[in-house]
Protein backbone atom coordinates (compact mmCIF):
# COMPACT_ATOMS: atom_id res chain seq x y z
CA UNK A 1 0.00 0.00 0.00
CA UNK A 2 1.20 3.50 -0.80
CA UNK A 3 -0.02 6.87 0.52
CA UNK A 4 0.71 10.37 -0.77
CA UNK A 5 0.44 13.11 1.84
CA UNK A 6 0.65 16.85 1.21
CA UNK A 7 1.68 19.17 4.00
CA UNK A 8 3.62 16.28 5.53
CA UNK A 9 6.41 18.41 7.02
CA UNK A 10 4.66 19.22 10.30
CA UNK A 11 1.50 18.99 12.39
CA UNK A 12 -1.38 16.75 11.39
CA UNK A 13 0.19 15.81 8.04
CA UNK A 14 3.41 14.70 9.69
CA UNK A 15 1.63 12.62 12.32
CA UNK A 16 -0.75 11.04 9.80
CA UNK A 17 2.33 10.01 7.80
CA UNK A 18 3.90 8.42 10.88
CA UNK A 19 0.64 6.68 11.79
CA UNK A 20 0.20 5.29 8.26
CA UNK A 21 3.78 4.03 8.27
CA UNK A 22 3.04 2.12 11.48
CA UNK A 23 0.22 0.41 9.58
CA UNK A 24 2.41 -0.66 6.69
CA UNK A 25 1.93 2.12 4.15
CA UNK A 26 4.86 3.21 2.00
CA UNK A 27 4.83 6.98 1.83
CA UNK A 28 5.22 9.89 -0.57
CA UNK A 29 5.72 13.03 1.49
CA UNK A 30 5.09 16.39 -0.18
CA UNK A 31 5.70 19.89 1.19
CA UNK A 32 7.94 22.86 0.44
CA UNK A 33 10.53 22.25 3.16
CA UNK A 34 12.82 19.35 2.28
CA UNK A 35 14.61 19.31 5.64
CA UNK A 36 11.35 19.00 7.56
CA UNK A 37 10.15 16.27 5.22
CA UNK A 38 13.36 14.36 5.91
CA UNK A 39 12.70 14.79 9.64
CA UNK A 40 9.26 13.25 9.18
CA UNK A 41 10.80 10.39 7.21
CA UNK A 42 13.11 9.55 10.13
CA UNK A 43 10.09 8.56 12.21
CA UNK A 44 8.70 6.25 9.51
CA UNK A 45 9.61 2.57 9.28
CA UNK A 46 8.39 1.92 5.73
CA UNK A 47 9.71 3.14 2.37
CA UNK A 48 9.52 6.93 2.03
CA UNK A 49 9.85 9.18 -1.03
CA UNK A 50 10.45 12.83 -0.13
CA UNK A 51 9.23 15.28 -2.76
CA UNK A 52 9.74 18.96 -1.87
CA UNK A 53 7.24 21.00 -3.87
CA UNK A 54 4.77 23.84 -3.46
CA UNK A 55 1.37 22.30 -4.23
CA UNK A 56 -0.46 25.62 -4.45
CA UNK A 57 -0.27 25.69 -8.26
CA UNK A 58 -2.25 23.51 -10.63
CA UNK A 59 0.92 22.89 -12.63
CA UNK A 60 2.71 21.43 -9.60
CA UNK A 61 -0.29 19.29 -8.71
CA UNK A 62 -0.14 17.83 -12.20
CA UNK A 63 3.60 17.22 -11.73
CA UNK A 64 2.87 15.21 -8.61
CA UNK A 65 0.24 13.15 -10.40
CA UNK A 66 2.52 12.52 -13.37
CA UNK A 67 5.37 11.40 -11.13
CA UNK A 68 3.39 9.28 -8.67
CA UNK A 69 0.63 7.51 -10.57
CA UNK A 70 -0.12 4.40 -8.59
CA UNK A 71 -1.17 5.23 -5.04
CA UNK A 72 -3.74 3.70 -2.71
CA UNK A 73 -4.38 6.72 -0.49
CA UNK A 74 -4.28 10.47 -1.10
CA UNK A 75 -4.21 12.77 1.92
CA UNK A 76 -4.84 16.40 1.00
CA UNK A 77 -3.58 18.10 4.15
CA UNK A 78 -1.62 21.19 3.02
CA UNK A 79 -3.25 24.47 4.00
CA UNK A 80 -2.99 27.61 6.14
CA UNK A 81 -5.16 30.28 7.74
CA UNK A 82 -5.17 34.04 8.12
CA UNK A 83 -6.66 36.16 10.90
CA UNK A 84 -8.14 39.64 10.59
CA UNK A 85 -10.99 41.80 9.33
CA UNK A 86 -11.80 40.95 5.71
CA UNK A 87 -11.25 44.55 4.54
CA UNK A 88 -7.83 44.66 6.21
CA UNK A 89 -6.27 41.27 5.39
CA UNK A 90 -3.81 41.10 2.52
CA UNK A 91 -5.49 40.19 -0.76
CA UNK A 92 -2.46 38.41 -2.23
CA UNK A 93 -2.09 36.29 0.89
CA UNK A 94 -5.79 35.37 0.75
CA UNK A 95 -5.50 34.36 -2.90
CA UNK A 96 -2.50 32.19 -1.97
CA UNK A 97 -4.70 30.57 0.68
CA UNK A 98 -7.45 29.89 -1.85
CA UNK A 99 -4.88 28.37 -4.22
CA UNK A 100 -3.55 26.04 -1.53
CA UNK A 101 -6.67 25.26 0.51
CA UNK A 102 -9.04 24.88 -2.45
CA UNK A 103 -7.37 24.63 -5.86
CA UNK A 104 -4.72 22.11 -4.85
CA UNK A 105 -7.27 19.91 -3.04
CA UNK A 106 -9.67 20.14 -5.98
CA UNK A 107 -6.99 19.35 -8.56
CA UNK A 108 -5.32 16.44 -6.77
CA UNK A 109 -8.67 14.95 -5.79
CA UNK A 110 -9.91 15.02 -9.38
CA UNK A 111 -6.72 13.62 -10.90
CA UNK A 112 -6.34 10.75 -8.45
CA UNK A 113 -10.06 10.02 -8.16
CA UNK A 114 -10.21 9.29 -11.89
CA UNK A 115 -7.40 6.75 -11.49
CA UNK A 116 -9.00 5.15 -8.47
CA UNK A 117 -12.40 4.81 -10.14
CA UNK A 118 -10.76 3.04 -13.08
CA UNK A 119 -9.18 0.42 -10.83
CA UNK A 120 -12.17 0.50 -8.43
CA UNK A 121 -10.05 0.90 -5.32
CA UNK A 122 -8.37 3.60 -3.27
CA UNK A 123 -9.03 6.22 -0.63
CA UNK A 124 -8.95 10.00 -0.44
CA UNK A 125 -8.79 11.90 2.84
CA UNK A 126 -9.35 15.64 2.57
CA UNK A 127 -8.48 17.76 5.58
CA UNK A 128 -11.07 20.45 6.28
CA UNK A 129 -11.88 21.83 9.73
CA UNK A 130 -14.72 22.26 12.17
CA UNK A 131 -14.72 25.73 10.60
CA UNK A 132 -16.42 24.11 7.61
CA UNK A 133 -19.72 24.10 9.48
CA UNK A 134 -19.76 27.83 10.28
CA UNK A 135 -19.18 31.28 8.89
CA UNK A 136 -16.03 32.76 10.40
CA UNK A 137 -15.92 36.48 10.99
CA UNK A 138 -12.25 37.51 11.44
CA UNK A 139 -11.16 34.37 9.57
CA UNK A 140 -13.70 34.59 6.76
CA UNK A 141 -11.56 33.34 3.88
CA UNK A 142 -10.16 30.39 5.82
CA UNK A 143 -13.59 29.26 6.97
CA UNK A 144 -14.88 29.56 3.41
CA UNK A 145 -12.07 27.41 2.02
CA UNK A 146 -12.72 24.66 4.53
CA UNK A 147 -16.44 24.73 3.79
CA UNK A 148 -15.52 24.14 0.14
CA UNK A 149 -13.41 21.11 1.03
CA UNK A 150 -16.20 19.68 3.19
CA UNK A 151 -18.91 20.19 0.57
CA UNK A 152 -16.74 18.86 -2.25
CA UNK A 153 -15.86 15.68 -0.37
CA UNK A 154 -19.39 14.87 0.75
CA UNK A 155 -20.74 15.46 -2.75
CA UNK A 156 -18.14 13.10 -4.21
CA UNK A 157 -19.13 10.49 -1.62
CA UNK A 158 -22.69 10.44 -2.93
CA UNK A 159 -21.54 10.22 -6.55
CA UNK A 160 -19.32 7.26 -5.68
CA UNK A 161 -22.11 5.57 -3.76
CA UNK A 162 -24.50 5.81 -6.69
CA UNK A 163 -22.08 4.14 -9.10
CA UNK A 164 -21.34 1.49 -6.44
CA UNK A 165 -17.65 2.32 -6.48
CA UNK A 166 -15.27 0.75 -3.98
CA UNK A 167 -13.33 4.02 -3.78
CA UNK A 168 -13.72 5.64 -0.36
CA UNK A 169 -13.58 9.33 0.58
CA UNK A 170 -13.39 10.94 4.02
CA UNK A 171 -13.18 14.51 5.27
CA UNK A 172 -11.38 15.39 8.49
CA UNK A 173 -12.95 18.28 10.43
CA UNK A 174 -10.85 18.88 13.57
CA UNK A 175 -11.31 21.64 16.08
CA UNK A 176 -8.28 23.35 17.64
CA UNK A 177 -5.09 21.32 17.19
CA UNK A 178 -1.70 22.24 18.63
CA UNK A 179 0.30 22.73 15.41
CA UNK A 180 2.33 25.39 13.57
CA UNK A 181 -0.94 26.42 11.87
CA UNK A 182 -1.62 28.72 14.82
CA UNK A 183 1.61 30.63 14.26
CA UNK A 184 0.95 31.05 10.54
CA UNK A 185 -2.61 32.24 11.13
CA UNK A 186 -1.38 34.47 14.00
CA UNK A 187 -3.92 33.19 16.54
CA UNK A 188 -4.05 31.28 19.80
CA UNK A 189 -7.03 29.28 20.97
CA UNK A 190 -9.24 30.04 23.94
CA UNK A 191 -9.94 26.33 24.48
CA UNK A 192 -7.53 23.45 24.96
CA UNK A 193 -6.26 22.09 21.66
CA UNK A 194 -5.93 18.39 20.86
CA UNK A 195 -2.49 17.04 20.01
CA UNK A 196 -1.82 16.34 16.36
CA UNK A 197 -0.69 12.84 17.31
CA UNK A 198 -4.09 12.07 18.84
CA UNK A 199 -5.90 13.57 15.87
CA UNK A 200 -3.78 11.56 13.43
CA UNK A 201 -4.42 8.21 15.14
CA UNK A 202 -8.14 8.92 15.54
CA UNK A 203 -8.38 9.98 11.91
CA UNK A 204 -6.62 6.95 10.48
CA UNK A 205 -8.74 4.63 12.64
CA UNK A 206 -11.99 6.20 11.41
CA UNK A 207 -10.85 6.51 7.80
CA UNK A 208 -10.01 2.81 7.62
CA UNK A 209 -13.52 2.10 8.91
CA UNK A 210 -14.89 4.13 5.94
CA UNK A 211 -16.14 7.00 8.08
CA UNK A 212 -17.18 9.90 5.83
CA UNK A 213 -17.01 12.82 8.28
CA UNK A 214 -14.27 12.56 10.91
CA UNK A 215 -14.48 14.91 13.89
CA UNK A 216 -11.96 14.24 16.69
CA UNK A 217 -12.97 15.32 20.19
CA UNK A 218 -16.36 14.92 21.84
CA UNK A 219 -16.61 18.61 22.74
CA UNK A 220 -16.10 19.61 19.11
CA UNK A 221 -18.75 17.14 17.93
CA UNK A 222 -21.15 18.51 20.54
CA UNK A 223 -20.41 22.08 19.49
CA UNK A 224 -21.05 21.32 15.83
CA UNK A 225 -24.34 19.65 16.71
CA UNK A 226 -25.35 22.71 18.74
CA UNK A 227 -24.86 24.96 15.70
CA UNK A 228 -27.84 23.26 14.07
CA UNK A 229 -30.12 24.54 16.79
CA UNK A 230 -29.24 28.24 16.74
CA UNK A 231 -30.22 30.99 14.26
CA UNK A 232 -27.48 32.13 11.89
CA UNK A 233 -27.21 35.66 13.26
CA UNK A 234 -26.78 34.32 16.78
CA UNK A 235 -24.07 31.95 15.58
CA UNK A 236 -22.28 34.80 13.82
CA UNK A 237 -22.17 36.84 17.03
CA UNK A 238 -20.92 33.87 19.04
CA UNK A 239 -18.26 32.97 16.52
CA UNK A 240 -17.06 36.56 16.22
CA UNK A 241 -16.49 36.65 19.97
CA UNK A 242 -14.66 33.33 19.84
CA UNK A 243 -12.38 34.60 17.08
CA UNK A 244 -11.75 37.83 18.97
CA UNK A 245 -10.64 35.84 22.02
CA UNK A 246 -8.02 34.14 19.85
CA UNK A 247 -6.57 37.53 19.04
CA UNK A 248 -6.82 38.67 22.67
CA UNK A 249 -5.01 35.52 23.86
CA UNK A 250 -2.28 36.08 21.30
CA UNK A 251 -1.62 39.55 22.69
CA UNK A 252 -1.08 38.29 26.25
Image: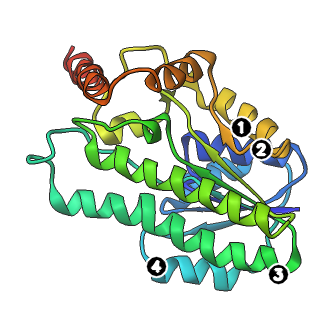
Residue tagged 2: 207
Q: Is residue 108 left or right of residue 32?
A: right
C-alpha separation, residue under disc 1 versus residue under disc 4:
27 Å
First in residue order: circle 2 vs circle 4: 4
Mark closer to the chain start, 4 or 3:
4
Reading the image, the residue beneath label 1 is 203
- Spatial separation of the CA atoms under disc 3 and disc 1: 26 Å
- Badge 2 element: helix
- Give 246 or 87, whichever is nearer the viewer: 87
Q: CA distance from mark 4 to mark 3?
A: 22 Å
Q: Which residue: 65% across, 31% down? A: 199
Instruction: For mark 3, give the secondary structure.
Output: helix
Mark found first going from the N terminus, 3 or 1: 3
Label 2, label 4: how far apart the Cα atoms are: 27 Å
As drawn, the label of residue 68 is: none
Reading the image, the residue beneath label 3 is: 118
Instruction: Identify residue for label 4.
Output: 58
Amino acid sequence: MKALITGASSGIGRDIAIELSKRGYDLILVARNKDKLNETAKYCSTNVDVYPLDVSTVENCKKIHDKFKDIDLLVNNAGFGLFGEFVETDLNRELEMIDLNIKSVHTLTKLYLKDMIKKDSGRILNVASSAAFLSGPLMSTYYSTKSYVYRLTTAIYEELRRIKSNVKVSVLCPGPVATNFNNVADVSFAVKALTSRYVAKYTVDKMLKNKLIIIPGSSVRLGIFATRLLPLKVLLKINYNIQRKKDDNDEK
